[in-house]
Amino acid sequence: MTGEHAVMYALTNRGSVSCTLTGYPQVTLYDTTGAVLPFRYAKGGGAYVTATKPVTVVLAPRASAYVLVAKYRCDLGVARNATAIRLTLPAAHGTSFAGHEAVAISGSTGLSYCRGGRHDPRPAIAVSPVEPTQQATGSLS
């Protein structure tokens, strides 16, 4: 209804010890050639993403935390499809972890770069903080 579309990412601790995350991940989206799409990124807000302050999330082994990434549709058409996303996670003790994964949704309803680029009505990507539940990432809870 709003024209904004969101993709949820589960972050699972595959290690043998707990880790602590706090804050917002750094997000980078790539096209099919591996080029970075020049989006602006907003910490929270929008129709779907929470605007609440980040909390500290302690992830036990095999536990998951969540990040929601949302973008408004491309009203002027798609210039380049996002085919991969890189999330660099904010660790509480100064270290970070980055993961690179395929983006499953393309086209005007996906995380695509729109025709008109930065002049498109809403070229920003809203990103939630790392949250302990899927529900906590959204503004509709």
Image: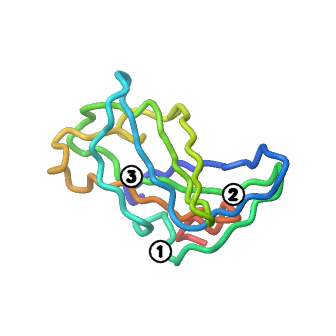
Q: Earlier in the sequence, mark 3 or mark 1?
A: 1
Q: Is residue 69 left or right of residue 20?
A: left
- Residue 3, position as x, y percentages in the image: 37, 54
Secondary element at tag 2: strand
Dot 1: few (<14), some (14–19), or many (≥20) neighbours within 10 Å?
Answer: some
Residue holding disc 3: 71
Relative to residue 125, is residue 138 drawn left or right? right
Label 3 vs label 1: CA separation? 15 Å
Q: Nearer the viewer, mark 3 or mark 1?
A: 1
Amino acid residing under circle 1: Ala
Q: Residue at x 56, y 54 (%)?
A: 89
Q: Name which residue lies at 49% across and 65% down.
A: 49
Quarter that holds the C terminus: bottom right
Amino acid type indicated by mark 2 = Ala
Which numbered disc flags the more N-terminal residue, 2 or 3? 2
Q: Quadrant of residue 115?
A: top left
**Quadrant where the image shows the N terminus:** bottom left
Q: Quadrant of residue 117?
A: top left
**Image location of residue 104, percent across then percent down:** 53, 33
Disc 3 marks a residue whose amino acid type is Lys
Could you tell me which residue is drawn at 54 percent across and 36 percent down? 100
Other residues around mark 2 within 10 Å, as few (<14) / some (14–19) / many (≥20) = some
Say which of marks 1 and 2 sits in front: 2
Drawn side of residue 67 relative to residue 112, left or right: right
Question: Viewer-nearest of labels 2 and 3?
Answer: 2
User: Which residue is outermost to the top?
Assistant: 33
Q: Residue 2: image x %, image y %?
A: 39, 60
Helix, strand, or loop for circle 3?
strand
Q: From the viewer's perspective, is residue 24 above or below residue 31?
A: below
Residue where numbered disc 1 is placed: 51
Q: Circle 2 is placed at which residue position?
A: 65
